[in-house]
Image: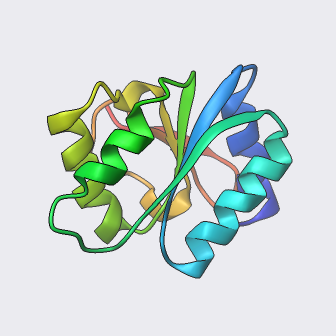
Amino acid sequence: MTSAELEALVGLIGRARHIVLGTAADPASRADGERIAAAWGGLVLATVTWPETAASWLRQAQRFAAPEPDVWVVSATPAGWTGMARRLQLSTSWRPERTLVTSALDGFPLPGLRGTRADGTTWETR
């Protein structure tokens, strides 16, 4: 994650009172999650990590969605996020409109999802 991307993501989080942070299990995603939490400096209600492949992702999806944060923030790879997002949509109250993702998921095809790019620009799937 670049400094410009991190700054843009913190800007998108803005004045949220609290977030839930989700990461894939790979070292880069987890490290980026830690950087996001430290740079934002606000209350992180939960940090949930999920594997690239799983039987259902149900347990992780429930833990990710349950705290009902102002914003969900995701640092993950497309492979793991695809399964996790599908489970979130099917089994929880999670909303993509309240979710921000890192550049690894740039343009992920889920309406309402927003994110940052490595150069610090932002995007939203419509």
Q: At which x and y percent is residue 41?
A: 85, 39
Q: At which x and y percent is residue 82?
A: 26, 58
Q: Is residue 47 left or right of residue 111?
A: right
| Residue in the picture at 68% in, 43% down | 9
Q: Nearer the viewer, residue 111 or 96?
A: 96
Image quadrant for the N terminus? bottom right
Q: Residue furthest bottom?
A: 27
Q: At which x and y percent is residue 124?
A: 44, 36
Q: Is residue 70 left or right of residue 90?
A: right
Image quadrant for the C terminus? top left
Rendering quarter of residue 44: top right
| Residue in the picture at 40% in, 26% down | 97
**Figure label count:** 0
Say if 59 sits above or below 69 in the image.
Answer: below
Q: Nearer the viewer, residue 121 or 66?
A: 66
Q: Nearer the viewer, residue 68 or 82?
A: 68
| Residue in the picture at 73% in, 60% down | 34
Can I make out residue 46 in this image? yes
Q: What's the image's color scheme?
A: rainbow
Q: Is residue 109 left or right of residue 73?
A: left
Q: At which x and y percent is residue 112?
A: 36, 29
Can I make out residue 108 in this image? no
